[in-house]
Image (tube, rainbow, N blue to C red):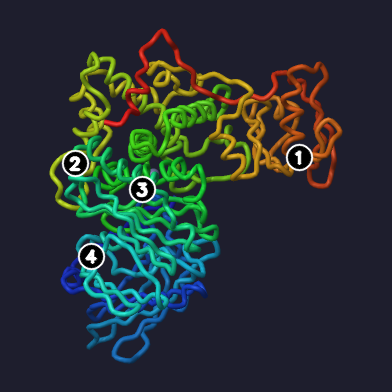
Amino acid sequence: MQLYPVWRLVFLASILSLAASAALAEEAILITVDATRTRQKLLHTHLVMPVKPGPQTLYYPKWIPGEHGPDGPIANLTGLKFEANGHTVPWQRDLLDVFTFHLEIPNGVSRLDVNFDYIEPDGGSATDKLLVLEWNEVLLYPADVPAEKLRYEAELAMPDGWQFGTALPVKNEAGNRVSFNPISLDLLVDSPVITGEFYRKIDLTPPGEPIHHEIDIAADSADALNMSPENQKQMINLVAESGKLFGARHYRDYHFLLALSDHVAHFGLEHHESNNSRLPERTLLLPSSGMTLGGLLAHEFAHSWNGKFRRPADLTVPYYEQPMKTDLLWGYEGLTDYLGPMLAARSGLWTPEQYREYLASIAAMLGPGRPGRTWRPLLDTAVVEPGLGFARGGWMSWRRGTDYYDEGDLLWLEVATIIHRDSGGKKSIDDFCQEFHGGPNHGPEVKTYTFDDVVNTLNQVVAYDWRGFWTQRLTNHGPGAPLTGIENSGWKLVYDEKRSPLIENWEEERKDIDARFSIGLDLMWNGEIVDTIEGMPAAKAGIGPGMKIIAVNGKRMGKHTFHDALQATKTSNIPLELLVENTDYYTTYKLDYHNGEMYPHLVRDESKPDMLSDIIKAK
Ligand SMILES: [Zn+2]
């Protein structure tokens, strides 16, 4: 190991530059982003930075809040040039860190001009008609000053006729240019801008709510903006229900920024006063719109309290070069993943049945029979997030994925049921949220927490061995998924041959077949095998991910052919016969399986009160 010399250098460099940079923080850095060439996937940045003669280090943001990893898109930065007093200032990239640039500022120089382009990747954040701008992608910042101490004054030029939405306070608008009030770097990075030709803003402030809420939608077509009155009502309910759940807000106003396109990456990224959410273009026009909106937007919205306001201490870093520790993601993401769907159900975006089908699908995916936890406890799925968290490919059930999200749902439901039970019905998970996420509104503010803080707050709500609970749940190796929350709440997990509308929806969207709970296969309609569940019939027979099913019982592979043949195993004595292609070779596999199709559901356990329905009822 050669850690020591490197760390020593970093430490010395930090001391030197902290002294030099104190003055920097006082004067704003000017940033102008020219997005008029968005259609060509080019965003141009011009920065004017106050500097002093001598060594200067600049960073491109590396550890991105909410992404929990060092995945700043440095590969897309190009054309980087520094100038001062009309002369080029040479730069050198750090030999150990590609996000770091070193310069020597000449004598007599007090302003540094920085120019570069950011290339929007295919399937990134830009289309012919819209752009979602995350500021961390288009800026550099001086080393070793906390992001909250650096001030930026931002201006954005958009293609002619495009409108925009953002939580950033606007200073001035003229033509296609907008300038924003000076703001700290951490708030700038926390406040994306959505802009587009087809744009609509809808007020989502519930009656009597003093804080303004809105959704800012940019889409690839005008039609796609048509959010139904019913969905609008449900979104307003979502805002109202969040107020009742947390009993407080920690923002000046709130913007749901929603991009609707088939050509951007689909995900949601939380911010304190907004969220950057992206869904397929026609989402709002489909019967499943409420389910889709609830699944994404309620989660990202809940993050404003859980993740942004209350944030694990070791995930909270002063600037974006500093590594984060992710061991508390079962709180940051796991609790959010529980609260989001709960709020979606309370607001009517989801029906109670949809909520139960969602829980059933998670419980089924995490077990029984899933082998990953035999070698790897839940806590480890959080700890590895920065490197391996979003690892993709086959054998997910064996390697385990980002289980701290889904298993977090089940565990926090268990917490909710214990609070209810041990308080004799006097307390609920809402009391925990009000204790943990409440308090006065100072605008966007971070209040960090540790494992002990979670345990102590739970104990304030109801006394229980919470330390033992979380320690056991986070470090155990089995035997299966933690179903106690579902069972405590008066329901049980069962399997039958009927696909839930939720699974039918997923299958249609992804054009795949979910046979994970029967023979242990996730495959596409064309036969390509996405994944195989270790220990289940297909895997036992020798089938693996990456292979392709060509024929089922002698007939060409197809969606209906496969479903029919799988269901027919129930009344047949002969094995299911799959002709499979693997790297140019064909093999016939015989699966001695006779249980038909199998899909998870929750059914009532009449021996217990129905706590689950109570938890998701509108407050
Ligand atoms: Zn999240």
**Residue furthest out toward the top:** 607
Q: Residue at x 75, y 21 (%)?
A: 569
Say which label, 4 or 3, has the lower sequence index: 4
The label number, if any, that marks residue 169 in the structure image: 4
Q: Residue at x 40, y 55 (%)?
A: 258
Picture coordinates of residue 382 (x, y %)?
A: 42, 39
Q: Quadrant of residue 160?
A: bottom left
Residue corresponding to mark 1 = 558
Instruction: Nearest to the eye among marks 2 and 3: give it.
Output: 3
- Element under disc 4: loop
Picture coordinates of residue 570 (x, y %)?
A: 73, 18
> Against 182, is 371 above or below?
above
Asked whether the residues under the numbered discs 3 and 1 touch, taking CB atoms below 8 Å apart as contact, a structural biologist would say no
- Element under disc 1: loop
Assess disc 4: are there few (<14), some (14-19) or many (≥20) residues with their C-alpha within 10 Å of its C-alpha: few
Assess disc 3: are there few (<14), some (14-19) or many (≥20) residues with their C-alpha within 10 Å of its C-alpha: some
- Element under disc 3: helix
Label 2 lies in ligand 1 vicinity (Cβ under 8 Å): no
Assess disc 2: are there few (<14), some (14-19) or many (≥20) residues with their C-alpha within 10 Å of its C-alpha: some
| Mark 2: amino acid | Ala
CA–CA distance in space, label 1 to label 4: 53 Å
CA–CA distance in space, label 2 to label 1: 52 Å
Residue corresponding to mark 3 = 232
Say which label, 2 or 3, has the lower sequence index: 3
Q: Residue at x 20, y 54 (%)?
A: 252
Q: Which quadrant of the render holds ligand 1?
A: top left
> Against 516, is 83 above or below?
below
Say which label, 4 or 2, has the lower sequence index: 4
Assess disc 1: are there few (<14), some (14-19) or many (≥20) residues with their C-alpha within 10 Å of its C-alpha: some
